């Protein structure tokens, strides 16, 4: 049946009716008339795939199915929205949709960070769209600006806070002085942290997002396995106290950078770790579960994107934007941007990355210790910017801030410090990002 626009309706299958899927289904049903005007054809919901079709979800029971694969294959489905999560099942479903020429919208960063290549090729071969704005930083438009608005510029750096759970925990630790375990438990009670917070606190979620951002920014396929990753679960209240004394805070950062290799050719670095960030840096002010991404491009300069990086409604906003784009393409002809991977840049090893460091050492409190410690830095060409003693006697600690050095030189220095008789323990080593020096 044709809509008022004269265009035949476009059939939509939504896979998943959880936090995000339920919001997407709501918008499709509630805003049907506006969406029809914006698209030029009505969207018709053909079905919603769930695990348990017996519970009342406030939508007509006949829309629910537990057979996601059959729903995707229906002839009257033109557009598939994947909001199940996980990797292998969505991979099968998204492949089935694309292979049948249906356009796909997904918020699934884990899937994309593992299989963008395969899925983009399937989309390409079957003249379908694959959109994924919601996969990085929820509601914040960052994929489309990188793929389209900056398509004529040269991006050098993308640095962001792309995980809301860990930003909530680090912000709360900074504000209250509480330790990691207490704050994580509070984040769980408030619904920010999942029952199993591993993907968030160990940086897997941010690493998947870094892979997606780096691929787009540098026109190179980058997968999650190319991303260097350190989680934030070992950050202590003492680290935040030391950071505060240096006029910094600590953030879990995703950094995607174009760097020059030894042969002068560009390489890509993609990495995730907790780092000190100076209080005056725009990312230091991003508090709670919010996300922000700073993009540095040659002609555009520095751009910052800020907003809600998770949650049902904010994420559904990005999903719906993609769905409208994919639907418009069906109505007007044409397709969204293809995967751009022409640059094929090499991935730089972490040991070559140059940044500043904060090293916290538990030391003997006696004459000569500072010079012995400083000598280990100097021997490996790591220049010290500041040193401060905290505590005294058995509780003496040295906090060392370096100038820029390679990760290799710093790792060698730390190994040597661990062998010094006067160093009881290297308590923590963190990078310092976003400082002018
Ligand atoms: P939920 O866990 O809340 O929902 C998952 C949905 O998938 C549920 O409705 C579930 O059914 C359904 N489902 C699970 N397995 C199957 C199956 N085998 N067949 C059919 N349906 C199935 O996930 P979210 O909504 O939180 O996340 C969805 C996606 O969006 C994920 O990829 C996530 O990474 C991404 N995302 C989520 C954000 C968020 O804030 N939540 C933010 C950005 C991205 P049932 O209801 O019966 O259990
Ligand atoms: N677990 C993610 C976060 C959800 O905390 O940001 C959004 O991808």
Image: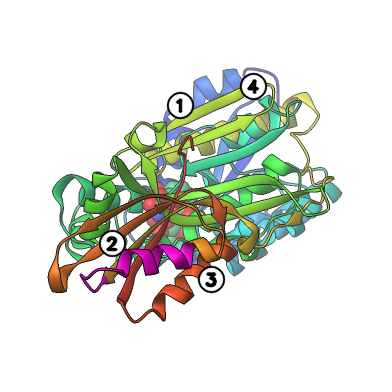
Disc 1, disc 3: CB below 8 Å?
Answer: no
Instruction: Say what secondary structure mark 4 lies in.
Output: loop
Mark 2 residue crowding within 10 angstroms, few (<14) / some (14–19) / many (20+): many
Front in this rendered view, residue 413 or 24: 413
Tell me where residue 275 appears, x and y as whole percent: 41, 52
- Answer left or right for 405 relative to 266: left
Q: Which circle's residue, 2 or 4, is located before the other in the chain?
A: 4
Sequence-wise first label, 4 or 3: 4
Q: Nearer the viewer, mark 1 or mark 3?
A: 3
Question: Which comes before the other along the chain, label 1 or label 3?
Answer: 1
Q: Earlier in the sequence, mark 4 or mark 1?
A: 1
Q: Which residue position is annotated with label 4? A: 300
| Nearest to N terminus: mark 2 or mark 3 | 2
- Of badges 2 and 4, the one in the foreground is 2
Q: CA distance from mark 2 to mark 3?
A: 18 Å
Q: Position of residue 240 (x, y in %)?
A: 25, 53
**Looking at the image, which residue sits at the far front?**
367
Q: Are marks 2 and 1 in contact (CB under 8 Å)?
A: no
User: For the magenta stretch, what is the residue range?
Assistant: 363-377
Can you tell me whether the CB of the residue at mark 4 lies under 8 Å from the nearest atom of ligand 2? no
Tally of marks:
4
Where disc 1 sits, the SS reads loop
Q: Quadrant of the N terminus?
A: top right
Residue 398 - label: 2
Occupied quadrant, residue 303? top right
Report which residue position mark 1 lands on. 31
**Pointer 2 with pointer 4, Cβ within 8 A:** no
- The kind of secondary structure element at disc 3 is helix
The image shows residue 101 at horizontal and vertical percentages of 78, 48
Residue at 74% of width from left, 53% of height from top?
A: 221
């Amino acid at each position: 049946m044709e809509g008022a626009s004269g265009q035949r309706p476009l059939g939509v299958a939504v896979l998943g009716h959880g936090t995000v899927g339920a919001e997407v289904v709501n918008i499709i049903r509630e805003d049907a008339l506006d969406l029809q005007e914006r698209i030029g054809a009505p969207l018709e919901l053909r079905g919603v795939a769930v695990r348990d079709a017996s519970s009342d979800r406030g939508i007509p029971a006949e829309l629910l199915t537990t057979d996601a694969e059959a729903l995707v294959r229906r002839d009257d489905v033109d557009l598939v929205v994947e909001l199940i999560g996980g990797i292998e099942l969505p991979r099968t479903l998204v492949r089935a949709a694309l292979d049948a020429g249906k356009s796909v919208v997904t918020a699934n960063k884990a899937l994309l960070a593992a299989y963008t290549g395969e899925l983009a090729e399937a989309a390409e071969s079957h003249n379908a769209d694959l959109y994924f704005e919601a996969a990085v930083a929820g509601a914040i438009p960052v994929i489309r600006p990188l793929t389209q608005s900056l398509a004529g510029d040269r991006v050098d750096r993308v640095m962001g806070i792309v995980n809301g759970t860990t930003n909530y925990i680090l912000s709360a630790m900074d504000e209250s002085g509480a330790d990691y375990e207490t704050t994580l438990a509070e984040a769980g009670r408030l619904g920010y942290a999942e029952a199993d917070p591993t993907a968030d606190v160990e940086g897997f979620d941010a690493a998947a997002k870094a892979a997606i951002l780096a691929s787009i920014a540098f026109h190179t396929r980058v997968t999650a396995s190319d991303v260097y990753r350190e989680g934030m679960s070992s950050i202590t209240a003492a680290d935040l106290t030391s950071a505060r004394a240096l006029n910094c805070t600590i953030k879990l950062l995703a950094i995607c950078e174009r760097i020059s290799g030894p042969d002068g050719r560009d390489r890509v670095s993609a990495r995730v770790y907790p780092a000190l960030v100076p209080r005056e840096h725009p990312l230091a002010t991003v508090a709670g579960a919010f996300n922000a991404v700073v993009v540095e491009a040659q002609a555009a300069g520095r751009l910052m994107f800020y907003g809600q990086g998770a949650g049902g409604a904010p994420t559904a906003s990005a999903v719906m934007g993609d769905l409208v784009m994919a639907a418009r393409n069906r109505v007007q002809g044409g397709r969204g941007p293809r995967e751009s991977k022409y640059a094929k840049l090499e991935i730089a090893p972490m040991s070559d990355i140059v940044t500043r460091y904060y090293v916290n050492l538990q030391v003997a409190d006696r004459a000569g210790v500072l010079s012995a410690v400083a000598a280990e830095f100097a021997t490996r060409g790591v220049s010290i910017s500041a040193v401060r003693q905290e505590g005294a006697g058995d509780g003496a600690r040295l906090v060392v801030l370096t100038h820029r050095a390679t990760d290799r030189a710093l790792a060698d220095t730390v190994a040597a410090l661990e062998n010094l008789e006067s160093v009881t323990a290297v308590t923590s080593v963190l990078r310092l990002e976003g400082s002018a020096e």
